[in-house]
Image (tube, coloured by chain):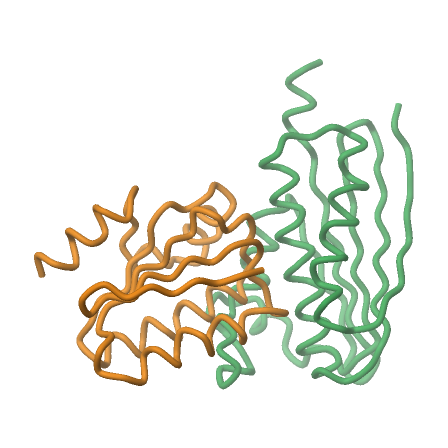
Amino acid sequence: MVNNTMKLTFPSKSQNEAFARIVVAAFASQLDPSIEELADVKTAVSEAVTNAIIHGYENTKGDIVIEAKLKDNNILEVIVKDFGKGIEDIEKAKEPLFTTKPELERSGMGFTIMENFMDSLSIDSYPGKGTTIRMVKAFKSLKDQE
Amino acid sequence: MEITLKKRKNTLLVNVFGELDHHNADYIRDKIDERLKTNAVKHVILDFSKLDFMDSSGVGMILGRYKKIKAKHGKLVVANLTPQVRRVFEISGLFNIIKEFKSIKEAFDYIEEV
């Protein structure tokens, strides 16, 4: 039975986008999911961390915290937290193609990708306090093996 | 991450190696836009055979180039997508406006017959 946790704090630098998604994928690989499932996790984490850097901190300095959990042999839970400006309208932010920063060529697809690549997504955000993204994925490739 | 650009007739062939995210999207954008400034380039083929990873920052970058090329009445197409990149294309709806080809040759053939 794999039960494990990890916690990582890093500054909101764009170099850390690759670092963060690789760390979470490496952590999740303890469960031995498929390559496609790991790619899904990498993509979703990349979106959450990029949002924290661009929107949460608007490219200023701040800390990003990632907490991840492995449980029940096939479930990954990832939390990505920032202490930045928060999201004014969460429902609007989740709409495909909606972006507050079109001038930066943002596609507005971040939350759509997180929702599609993970099994569940929840967003807690308070203006001026920050945003917490919680995502869960059950690795189906592992269940099939049992 | 690395990018190579080659021109054949009025088509720019762009190869992106490694990972395309927010950290390097601006660099890739600037490299392509430099070449789009001149009238010598009308069409673009993005060869993603060596692109291991892309997120929505790549989607934004591609959409930005698509609009520029469309304004010049040119075509932007992609070739050789890896599975992760194809999934991001599918979910973000890029295939509604951008054609995918299985080889550079097919992509060139399509552009030249137009």
Q: How many marks?
A: 0
Q: Is residue B70 above or below residue A66?
A: below
Tell me what hue chain A is rendered in.
green
Q: Quadrant of the C terminus of chain A?
A: top right
Q: Position of residue A127 (x, y in %)?
A: 77, 82
Q: Identify the residue at the far left of this view.
A: B113
> x and y percent of residue A139 in the render?
68, 32
Residue A127 visible from this viewpoint:
yes
Q: Is residue A101 left or right of residue A74?
A: left
User: Residue at point 79% right, 65% down?
Assistant: A132
Determine whether, in the image, residue B63 is placed left or right of residue A40.
left
**Placement of B73 over or under A30, stated as above or below:** below
Which percent across, then down, holds residue A52?
72, 71
Residue B97 appears in the figure: no
Apparent side of residue A89 relative to residue B88 in the rendered image (left or right): right
- Residue appearing at x 72%, y 67% in the figure: A15
In the rendered view of the protein, which quadrant contains the N terminus of chain A?
top right
Chain letter for the orange part: B
Residue B13, located in which quarter of the rendered image? bottom left
Please tell me which residue is depicted at 24% across the width and 68% down the height of the picture. Answer: B43
Where is residue A96 drawn, in percent x and y?
A: 48, 65
Left-right relation of A95 to A4? left
Tell me which residue sits at (72%, 45%) in the image. Answer: A136
